[in-house]
Image: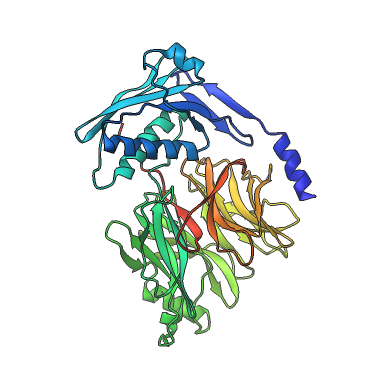
Amino acid sequence: MYKVLLKKILLTITSVLIISNVNALKIEINRGQTKPEPIVIKKNNNHDTLAKLIAIIENDLKLSALFNILPDNNIDIKNLKEWQKQGVRFLVYGKQDGDQVIFTLIDVITGKKLINNKVVNINQSNIRETAHAIADYIYERVTNELGYFKTKIVYVTTVNNAPRTTKLVMMDQDGANVKSLTNGKELVLSPRFSSTGKNIAYIAYTTSKKARDTLDRSVHVYICNLEDNSRRRLLNDSIMKELIKKNKGNPVSMTYAPRFSPNDQSVVFAIIIEGKSAIYKYNMTDNKLIQLTKHENIDTSPCYSPDGKKIVFTSNRVGTEALYVMNANGSNQHKISQEGGKYSQPVWSPRGDLIAFTKQINNDFYIGLVKPDGSGERLIAKAYLVEAPIWSSNGRYIVCTYQESSSAKSKILFMDLTGRHRRKIETKGDASSPAWSPTVKNNK
């Protein structure tokens, strides 16, 4: 039934191309599949560095599913009519001048230079970063949206199985530049980026049998500073001891790490007390912990709206897990999801127009999208296990945990809003619970 419904939804989707008044192409994908724009990047075989940059730029644009990379047929850059005959829409050409790249982007149809002699400094210690920056310039000028090629993805990978330990690993959005953030001696879960991208929140607890103290055996939230890789506990010992007392002397547990508010001044997360979890907000400016829901149900996985005024979360207060929205102060709690399935892990789009979520129907898992008022629900991915969606900064793409079968390793799945364009991001080991950094804007 759901396969038929999903097919009907996909058959009704449309895509729109709008030419803006600044001659840039705005590509809007809501439910349809947009035809990739043909683009050529002129080669310059005299510079090895430039050749490496072009290869990475072409790969970035291709993987976005919005560009079709066409071959360079040695046509003169001024012969736009010939480029048009070759089916080219956009043309990029440039040169390397010492430690700089100077490039131009032309709309072949209109003849307008969308980018004219843009100078980009080459980071010799990280060529990929320079290439991602140039790809972002091209992407942003063509689509009028934030680029995402300079972003990072942090995920959880298994180190040992008995006792199980995990570590956080960071990589570029295309899977390159892999770096470990934690040492793999404890169990770490659910990383979350701050809105600036400078910090990551995650939960961790020790698996060591030597940890006899109730405070040590509790689950703790850590903040990792990516600039110096230092870390600190979010909640001080005094707050944790009060929670332990509230839990009748037992260790405190949490299901997911906090999510930051848009201004990074607070975080929201769930704390389990006597088997019931409630949503809390922690103000980092004054170190105050504020309870937003009651410990009567399983309220968990909260996420702020992009304006910080609302919070979406999961609750089983109606008997099964459903999606709820409330004001940031905990008022006006109301259900928005449909019946027929278990909802979890909601996350608000940076655009504010959609909420992504995990849904389980019988033994099948889905990634779905819904409007904040609960209307327009659609399922865009299905697998043996697919969960923990997270958005790109421009609200066009999603990455999530993906597992094909019970014997397969979990991987990171990348897809667009339609779910039609998807690919696995290759990692050395298993990978789950991805976090996607915000876009670092190019200097104009």
Give the image location of residue 246, x and y in percent.
51, 78
Front one among 91 and 288: 91
Give the image location of residue 197, x and y in percent.
37, 51
In the rendered image, the residue lying farthest to the left is: 98
In this rendering, is residue 70 above or below 197?
above
Quadrant assignment for the C terminus: top left
Give the image location of residue 35, x and y in percent.
58, 29
Residue at 62% of width from left, 29% of height from top? 15
The answer to whether 362 appears left or right of 23 in the picture is right
The answer to whether 139 appears left or right of 291 in the picture is left
Asked if residue 310 shows in the view, the reply is no
The picture quadrant where one finds residue 50 is: top left
The answer to whether 350 appears left or right of 131 in the picture is right
The picture quadrant where one finds residue 221 is: bottom left
Front one among 255 and 237: 255
Residue at 58% of width from left, 41% of height from top? 421
Give the image location of residue 382, x and y in percent.
66, 53
Residue at 40% of width from left, 20% of height from top? 106
In this rendering, is residue 26 above or below 109?
below
In this rendering, is residue 390 above or below 292?
above
Q: Give the color scheme: rainbow, by chain, secondary structure or one colour.
A: rainbow
In the rendered image, the residue lying farthest to the right is: 1
In this rendering, is residue 59 above or below 189?
above
Asked if residue 386 shows in the view, the reply is yes
Count of numbered marks: 0
Front one among 270 and 100: 100
Front one among 214 and 34: 34
